[in-house]
Amino acid sequence: MDAAQILLVVMWVGVTLYALLAGADFGGGIWDLVAGRSRAGMPQRRLIEHSIGPVWEANHVWLIFVIVVLWTGYPPVFAAVMSTLYIPLTLAALGIIARGAAFVFRKASTELWQQRLFGAAFATSSVLTPFFLGTVAGGIASGRVPPGLATGDLVTSWLNPTSLLGGVLAVGVCAYLAAVYLCDDAGRAGLPGLAEGFRRRALFAGLGVGAVVLGGIAVVRWDAPRLFDGLAHRALPLVVAAAVLGLLSLALLWRRSYLSVRITAALAVTAVLWGWPLAQYPVMLPPGLTVEVAAADPAVLGATLVVLAVGALLVVPSMTWLLLLQRRTPYDPGAHG
Amino acid sequence: MGIGGGVGACVATVLVLPAGPASAADLVAARLQMALSLGWHIVLACLGVGMPALLLYAEWRAIRTGDGDSMRLARRWAKAIGVLFAVGAVSGTILSFEMGLLWPGLMGTYGEVIGLPFALEGIAFFVEAIFIGVYLYSWDRLPPRIHLLSGVPVLIAGVASAFFVVTANAWMNQPVGFVVENGRVRDVAPWRAMFNPATPPQTLHMIVAAFMVAGFATAGVYAVAMLRGRRDRYHRLGFMIPFTMAAVFAPIQILLGDYAAKFLAEYQPAKLAAAEGLFLTRAGAPLSLGGFVVDGELRYAIEIPNGLSLLVGYSPHTVVQGLDQVPVADRPPVTPVHLAFDTMVGIGFFLLLLSAWYVLAWGRRRELPRSRWFLRLAAVSGVAAVVAVEAGWVVTEVGRQPWVVYGRLRTFDAVNPVPGLWIGFAVVSLVYAVLTVATVYVLRRMARAPQELTHAPQEPE
């Protein structure tokens, strides 16, 4: 593997961690949205806040990581994606602002009407942001983002069948991951009633995502034949793995093995995420812009890899500590902060 | 990259052509949107860099002496930082989006040259976000000393982030460490690009500015409370810790500003000429205060004879380059740059004098200046410091025009050619207006909340 390929793998690890960690934080917001009226939904909202609170900012940094690696390692791809997909990415950016700010404002406010207002902004943007990011993925995967500055269609590059599939799938996956994680969190917080509720939601979301994926096969086959071809051949093992892990997760949820399903659900999502680049490798922007052509100067790739390796030595242990502290933080049902 | 590299470079030529014809309105909209998001984020970033120092000092003091007031201040500041950091994290993310959304012509060609400092900044931001999570959520769960130590990486990473990001901006002023061939850069020396000639003056000037903003702004909150009669020890301490920090940095900043201006005289004379409103290259160049440009000359300015020559070269005979050395098409707009520069310098000296007043009173009597005017001025010092930072960025950014990468890439060649950027600007402005109102509202509520509530948040009913 040369430096351009290694950096691509590193970037995709970033995408995966963003999906698994920040995705679940968005999913928490989605469940917050449907948690019901203020009083009835309070326990769920508290648990969601407890699970997201200490970690969402650190989880969010993976997105910045991915963006920076993309523009550093593959600048023409970054320029093409950002310029053509200007609309959904601007909307995703605004969603990111609204989600983060509203979440922390809700925590800092004490009056019900404020908590409702900020809560609504938090929850709505938690649905919209992954949706728009999903449409971006769909636009790229279906080959609607040609190389060059804004050479793709400003609207159909993200309003098309594959993009809509990507958007719905992203929202579904976020909701599913969050529900799975929250089962475990509720169990450890000593709230079996809440755990049952999130188990129901996780099963529902899991079946929903499964149905979307099955329907999506037809959509991709018709709308993005090249991607379909890659998924049906080179990436087939990952597609099969995703299906098996998905079914296994449903079984584990049924049996209330919350800790195990945390792992299998994350692995299932990982398999889906890695299927996409494997299906289209070495092409970054279909039809013809390959990793090799898009890659930055070797000196840049080398320096970036060294810096990221050193950074990992700093970040991985501290991140582990944070996640452990968060898991060990006793759940305080009365605490609002 | 191997053999494919040559082929790749040829193919790439076609990929990153200049963006070309964006409408004038869209270019203005893109610039305003970037200015709004950057100008907004800079305030949060300054507080994020400087406030952890105040917080850690207060907590350290509380642990060492058992002082309850210090601990209450630390808790209060920690809550504020929690809000500010979250808002700063998202407003910073938007900037990384906008680099591509608005300026793909810059990033598509030069993204790799300035990528390294951003990768480093990403790591620093990670460290900051992780430890701020640890610090804020483990206050009563970690032993006091460990808790204090868990805040130290937040401070270091905040300063480091500021350094890394400003090196990238410095590179836009002094682009080195690459060769352009067929529209694609090659032979990139990323470390050389990062440590370009503009890096030392710009990073030092900005980091010190951040500490001044955080110090004066925090002190300003307590100055207001003291003017309203709350002069107890808690409020005095809440004023003095941040004001002392800012007062220490104020004179250093004047020296660094002088250093940055001398740097411009040597490396980016067009920017200095615009900042000083100097059109004619000459010895004995005057220092012009205020005024504006009419028909290619600065009018209505107060002139200090030989002032600029003396500042640049310590001699009235020093020749200072004027805008006449720059082709008309390559000149930055003079009036805004000049007035912004004067605003920044004026506020810098105002803050220096205010700091001197404070230090003298303390040196003489071990207490704050007695005059209410001191508190009144201190109350606005935070806003003044913010205005100075914004004015400084106007000098840096507008003073570099028409270039986005000095001498290499013009701003209108970098902008996204999609139509309707002004719609995006309108929507983004609206969101920022709401965000500003909400942030100020939440922070004011937090500042006004009775102190005992800092510990035990109320049950929402």
Image: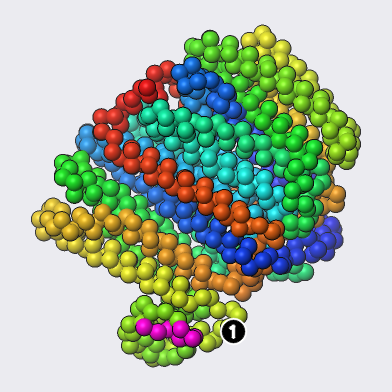
* Magenta residues, start to end: B294-300
* Amino acid at dot 1: Pro
Q: Is residue A134 visible?
A: yes
- Report x, y in % for residue A245: 75, 20
**Residue B298 included in the magenta stretch of the image:** yes
Q: Where is residue A177 in the image (x, y as percent from the top left)?
A: 64, 25
Q: Nearer the viewer, residue B184 or A316?
A: B184
Residue density around tag 1, few if under 14, some if 14–19, many if 20 or more, within 10 Å:
few
Element marked by disc 1: loop
Q: Position of residue A53 (x, y in %)?
A: 48, 30
Q: Is A190 on the left or on the right of B304, as rendered?
A: right
* Quarter of the picture holding the N terminus of chain A: top right
Nearer to us in this view, B414 or B180 = B414
In this picture, is A95 found above or below B380? above
Which residue is found at the position 32% from the left and 35% from the top? B75
Q: In this view, does A335 lie to the left or right of A157?
A: left
